[in-house]
Amino acid sequence: MSSLWPELEQFLGEVQKPARYIGCEDGMLIPDHRPDKAAWLLVYPDTYEVGLPNQGLQILYEILNERPDAVAERSYAPWTDLAAVLRREGLPLFSLDTHRAAGDFDVLAFNLSAELVYTNLLECLDLAGVPLHAADRGADDPLVLVGGHCAYNPEPIADFVDAAVLGDGEEVVSEINELVAAWKRAGRIDRPGLLADLAGIEGVYVPGLYEATWHDDGTLASVAPNHPAAPAEVPKRTVADLADWPYPRQQLVPLTEVVHDRLNVEVFRGCTRGCRFCQAGMITRPVRERPAEQVRTMVADGLRRTGYDEVALTSLSTADFSGIEEVVADTVSDDACGQVSVSLPSLRVDAFTVGIAGQIQRARRTGLTFAPEAGTWRMRQVINKLIREEDLYGAVESAFSNGWRRVKLYFLTGLPTETDEDTLGIVELAKNCVEIGRRHHKGASVTVSVGGFVPKPFTPFQWFGQNTEAELRRKVGLLRDAARKARGVQLKWHDPRASVVEGLLSRGDRRLGAVVEDVWRNGGVFQEWSEHFDLDLWLSALERAGLTLEDLVYRHRREDEALPWDHLSAGLHKDFLWQDWRDALAEVGLEDCRWTPCYDCGACTGYGIEHVVASAVPPAGGSQGTGQELATGGEVPVKLLVGAGGREAGS
Amino acid sequence: MNAPLNPRLRVRFAKHGKVRFTSHRDVARVWERALRRVAMPVAYSEGFSPRPRLSFGLALPTGCASVGEYLDIELDRVRAGEVELDDELCRRLDAALPAGIDVQGVAPIERGGPSLQEAVVACTWEIAVAGTGSEPSDLPDEQARAWVAGVLAAGELPLERERKGKRVTDDVRPLVHALDMLAEAEAEGGTSVPGVGGSVRLRAVLGTRPRALRPSELLEAGNLVAAGDAHPPLRARAVCRMHQWIEAEAEEPGTSPDDEFDRNQLIMQGDRWTGWQERGLTEPLPLPATAAVSAALVGTRA
């Protein structure tokens, strides 16, 4: 176990952006490798710029390194130029912290946040010198784990992983480590025994202990245990209280530019707004807020330690955080931190939100983003994103009247029951927003960003047949024609071809392992990067495997049909999801259960846990914030907070 | 009407080890964060997007090390008096910076003086070179010596490079102020390119006007005129910027009248590199002795 740096540094001059391979971040830990400590390599199988900010990976990095029986280092997917150099020079994938060979670690743990990185998982394993197939690994090979949102349906990569971990990692990572450290101390001999023991940990799924079978018509029959240690259903893990886990304590500060290059403090986990397209909202229930006092401490300490001048308060809908106004006010007025801007990803659509934004975006008042997701009220009832047009126009009015010049709106197309009228409603909304903006600024503009909807496991839309590529293209074409005639509306859209592959992988079964491997063998890496994405690789691989998009992606699934993730559980009852799917088709909305009675989705009851919400009343705002009178939205006073430091920054 | 000028500090620092693979822009961001962490009262620009008023010298090519990098900091006029110029400041800055970016000295400079980019006229580089083979020993001394002689004897050194999106050919021979092969003893005992053993080392003083000549460009242009069957093309194994040079009368650290700082507060000040005194050049912030430079590099290979 020694550093590969002396070899690597001779070649880093040949590759683009070599700074992403040096480590050296503030917050980096220098581990003390010892025979009695399990050595983990935490891998984010995308570029450093995308992977470094990932909070999940950083949390596990700290928790493991705090343990006396573990060390953890990090690695990210080398860009294609470095991968070529590594192969040419016979060098392996390496850690960034001490530039050790990946094969020297006991565990390679991959964070899978997006399906399109699956081929990069194979690329990393191959560069590490680890056999791609779990069945081919022996005593000398590390254990290959995956976690992250994609772990909720790991079937398409079941052949390649030793175990998948479902849900929050804070607690389960230590339970896994104890088994791995014991395995290492015993000489790493009994790999089957380790896998059987891992299957006994709640939240750990060992695909090799299950067998998938299909009916004659090609539909899945079941995925069932073929080993006594494997439970019939693997439930996800959930930490009951975020206050127990104030991580990362020392967020990594990279030396080179990355996405989200700022302090990130998670203010709550989970979301019960119940947007039916949103997998993250469904699988991370219930809502667990971090105490406001702890948020303040993490923000203040983090800013002082890192030197960042921006902090993001992260969650799935930060304006819903009970203490949001106070926390924001305290942060921007804390002189010790200097001139700090606060960003709130995932803004709710209402004037209250714009008020908070007015308080915090002191300097850079360039653009504000909202996500109405659908163009008509009917469509928004189907997806349970209950924003009235008045809410959106109120928010846009506030934004433009308070100095913003550009508003960005996110939408999905290809939603269940969507008609052309619904699709074109997107441009109608945008046109009205431009009109509101032009009352304040001649140059006001609205950018509309449209993504093709991909149904995900453990959502009410998991049965929905995804729109075909041709249909998504047609809808984008409708929007493009309409937007061309609309002054001040700029349209951007996500590549429908990528949506097709994302759909294939998100709800696919084990037969896709051969497809993923085929695409990788034909050079298909970095498929989430448009310059590398290649639909033809996927289509020809599907053909070779005898599979079709029609069966796997475009077809509506039946109520009685086995789903590839039926033996896994995100806590949600399947009959709740089915009922919610029926409600969606009936255009019936569902309230946010934080402030209304429980409708027993299963996320709390099955685990004996509850929402952790500091405020007993819903936040002020439009109908979306109230959980009341869903059809029309409730009467809620809207308070604007503008002027609190609004124009001071230029002085 | 002109606004009153802000007090300025000049920092000299080294960049070596793993962090030499960061870009010029990366280093600028690293400094911005470090200055916030030590609560330095940096002046900010006006407007909707205020930026700290920092200026760096000539960009160091990514991957090159340096023992002579500079940063000029404009201080907030009102709060500049809070700054204590002492060893503790250097220590706190070092603690806020990544390993491999080492503060060598801090001194006040004239308010409103020329920027480093305008002032620097030449840089001294050390270049550890190799031939086409993979081993350092593939390049015998005499071949490197012949290469140097070939470059110096050339009347012209045409170099094709990109300028404003167009390919242009410049004669860069006038920018090669000095070029020699370092003697064995000099390379081992004195200043040297960090981290590369067994290589032949070149020392080059390259001009910056009208457009700076980079070490990689020197090798490229030199290989065209000086390489052949007898003299194989050279490639750089490692590069280190040793000095940046400015005209002595243009700027003299610590000598300008300034009500915030006086000359006695200067932390580090030393002799100019003797070879350049007669040409009227000095370093933007000279160090006491070259020994201190190499000491800073000992044991720092990450």
Image (tube, rainbow, N blue to C red):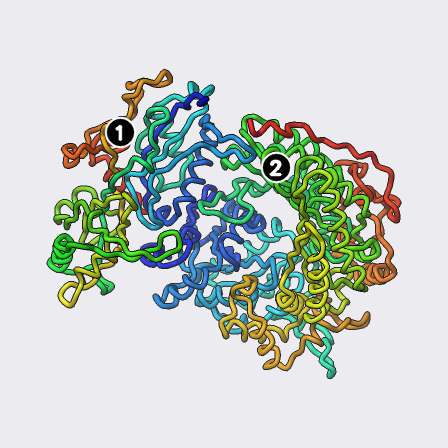
Image quadrant in which the C terminus of chain A is located: top right
Residues under labels 2 and 1: Cα distance? 43 Å
Left or right: B299 in relation to B44: left
- Which of the pair B91/A64 is nearer the observer? B91
Which residue appears at 27% of the width and 53% of the height?
B170
On the image, the x and y values in percent for residue B282 come to 22, 32
Whether residue A38 is visible to the viewer of this picture, yes or no, is no
Image label count: 2
The 10 Å Cα crowd at callout 1, few under 14, some 14 to 19, many 20 or more, is: few
- Which of the pair A295/A20 is nearer the observer? A20
Residue A301 sits above or below residue A43 on the image: above
The secondary element bearing badge 1 is classed as loop
On the image, the x and y values in percent for residue B102 come to 34, 37
* Numbered circle sitting on residue A342: 2
**Quadrant assignment, res A613:** top right
Which residue appears at 65% of the width and 79% of the height?
A547
On the image, the x and y values in percent for residue A13 come to 34, 56
**Quadrant assignment, res B190:** top left
Residue A593 sits above or below residue A215 on the image: above
The secondary element bearing badge 2 is classed as strand
What kind of residue is marked 1?
Answer: Ala
Q: Which residue is mark 1?
A: B250
Which residue appears at 48% of the width and 64% of the height?
A124
Residue at mark 2 shares a chain with residue at mark 1: no
Which residue appears at 77% of the width and 45% of the height?
A392
Camera-side mark, 2 or 1: 1
- Which of the pair A368/A62 is nearer the observer? A368
Chain designation of label 2: A
Chain designation of label 1: B
